[in-house]
Amino acid sequence: MTKQTLFFSLPPEIEAATACAVIDSLPNNWSWVDGSMTAPAPLIASGEAVKDAGLMFGYYGTVAPVFVGERPDGKYREPDMHALYVDGRLPQTVLMQYAGLHHGMVTIKLAKAIAVKYIGFGYTGWLAACQGYNDDCLEESICARFKICWGGVPTPGKPPKYPLAYVAIRTSNEYAPSQLGTDIIIAKCRSLELTEFQTEYEL
């Protein structure tokens, strides 16, 4: 099986809006979504986002969304449940782990909407998705991959080898892009006039 990965960079001036448009193009019949998004520093400093609190959407161990604590220094910290449930404040992080697998409570469509909502609040991070022909998470079953990163900050003294904000789409020659739905994502990237680039990075 031959795999091919296409890469597109996101324009810095409209990075968040472009990320939302690309995420929305992800087909709703894909198998699952992973991801991690973090609130911007001003939201945390102002208290609008609760420090050391995460909102997890997953499949293994938790079918329903749950609030989780953080381990910023290796020590687990309980989330401030009053601030989250009563005050309605935002979590510091939003996490997805196999969200949408086996079409549970969190569907692919809902996972995309959640991501777009938090990007609107200024959250940055990454989102990845897979299409597996057995609708499972085994590597041998995966026939297409997608990943998008936005809002990344370069490491001091270490120039990035590729754009920090990008879209990556991996396809297989065993399936036509129209069978996988990757043609929809690629068409969206090209309609947004995103710049295609080459890198040694493998998805």
Image (cartoon, rainbow, N blue to C red):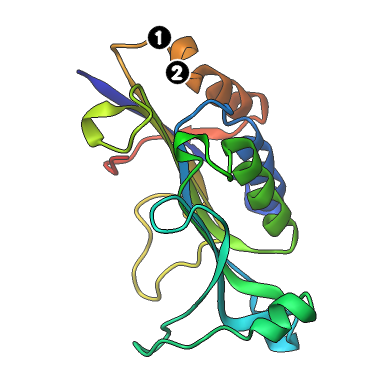
Q: Residue furthest right?
A: 87
Percent x, y of residue 135: 38, 29
Q: Are marks 2 and 1 in contact (CB under 8 Å)?
A: yes
Name the side, left or right, on which 47 lies relative to 203.
right
**Residue type, mark 1 in image:** Ala
Q: Which mark is residue 33?
A: none
Q: Quadrant of residue 93?
A: bottom right
Q: Which mark is residue 176?
A: 1
What residue appears at the point 53 percent right and 41 percent down from the top-left corner? Answer: 104
The quarter of the image holding the N terminus is: top left
Percent x, y of residue 18: 67, 42
Task: State the SS at label 1.
Answer: loop
Name the side, left or right, on which 132 lies relative to 36.
left
Percent x, y of residue 90: 70, 72
Q: Can residue 89 be seen here? A: no
Q: 158 and 116: which one is in front?
A: 116
Q: 177 and 71: which one is in front?
A: 71
What residue appears at the point 50 percent right and 52 percent down from the top-left corner? Answer: 63
Q: Residues within 10 Å of mark 2 (few under 14, many from 20)?
A: many
Task: State the SS at label 2.
Answer: helix
Q: Residues within 10 Å of mark 1 (few under 14, many from 20)?
A: few
Q: How many marks?
A: 2
What residue appears at the point 51 percent right and 86 percent down from the top-left corner? Answer: 78
**41 in relation to 150, above or below:** below
**192 in relation to 36, above or below:** above
What residue appears at the point 63 percent right and 71 percent down from the top-left corner? Answer: 39
User: What residue is shown with label 2?
Assistant: 180
Q: Quadrant of residue 44?
A: bottom right
